[in-house]
Amino acid sequence: MRKVAFAFCYMPLLVAIDIASKAWAVLALDFGASSILIFPGISYRLAFNPGVSFGLFAESPVMVLALTSVLTAGLTIWFWKARSRWIELALATIIAGAVANIIDRVVNGAVTDFISFGQPDAPIFTNNLADMWITAGAVLLFANHTLSERAKSTLHKNERPPALEGPNVR
Amino acid sequence: MSGKPPIVLRLFHLLLWGFFAVAILWYVAVPFVVRLLA
């Protein structure tokens, strides 16, 4: 039931927010115009990225599409097999971002990026909401893994065999 | 726990969400404002 809610409410919602924000960006921002500072360190600047994050593999869009599709399919299988709600939430967030970018790639042949980080005239990188979903999901997945490993190790520490603690008088 | 929350809490929530809504709308409007002024 939770998986169905993630798959048919949460993921479409995130995809819709991302697609709407990209449509707004294409409408509101001029391609090639100078960036608009909206917050210290964050600005709007319209860019189209045919590759993946940080402009990698920009020269072969079809390969990028195939690669991301296979990765997304793998993540979806992991999502359906997952048993923890945090892992499901993290994977649902990542898959939503990946699907939103794949849709953009199929429709436009490139990913629409419009949020720049760093100095407005020399940004470090430019991304979009889908990239933020992917990053947030990855951070959640990593945090969940790290915290559950820590919980496991403290559990083992507390579960010392009674023989080591001397006579067990109760 | 039943009934409506206190009026102060409801006002606080209204202000908080109103603030977020106005902030988001402002950032949506910024590029248009910049284009108008340019």
Image: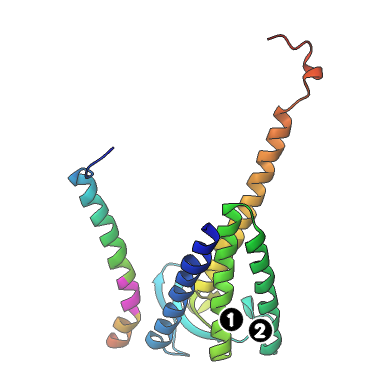
Please name the amino acid that badge 2 sits on: Leu
> Residue drawn 22% across and 45% down?
B4
Label 2 and label 1: CA atoms lie apart by 7 Å
Q: Quadrant of residue A44?
A: bottom left
> Residue drawn 59% across and 74% down?
A98
Report if residue A118 is visible in the image. no
Q: Quadrant of residue A67?
A: bottom right
Q: Position of residue A126 (x, y in %)?
A: 53, 77
Answer with mark 2 or mark 1, whichever residue precedes in sequence: 2
Residue range in magenta is B25-30
- Residue B26 is inside the magenta segment: yes
* Residue extending furthest toward the left: B7
Q: Position of residue B6 (x, y in %)?
A: 20, 43
Q: Position of residue A140 (x, y in %)?
A: 58, 56
Numbered circle sitting on residue B5 = none
> Residue drawn 24% across and 50% down?
B12
Up/down of B34 relative to A4, above or below: below
Residue that badge 2 annotates: A65
Q: Characterize the magenta stretch by its predominant secondary structure.
A: helix
Report if residue B23 is visible in the image. yes
- Residue B28 is inside the magenta segment: yes
Q: Are marks 2 and 1 in contact (CB under 8 Å)?
A: yes
Q: Position of residue B2 (x, y in %)?
A: 26, 40
Residue that badge 1 annotates: A102
Query: Which part of the image, by quadrant, shows the C terminus of chain A?
Result: top right
Please name the amino acid that badge 1 sits on: Ile
> Residue drawn 31% across and 78% down?
B29
Q: Residues within 10 Å of mark 1 (few under 14, many from 20)?
A: many
Q: Residues within 10 Å of mark 2 (few under 14, many from 20)?
A: many
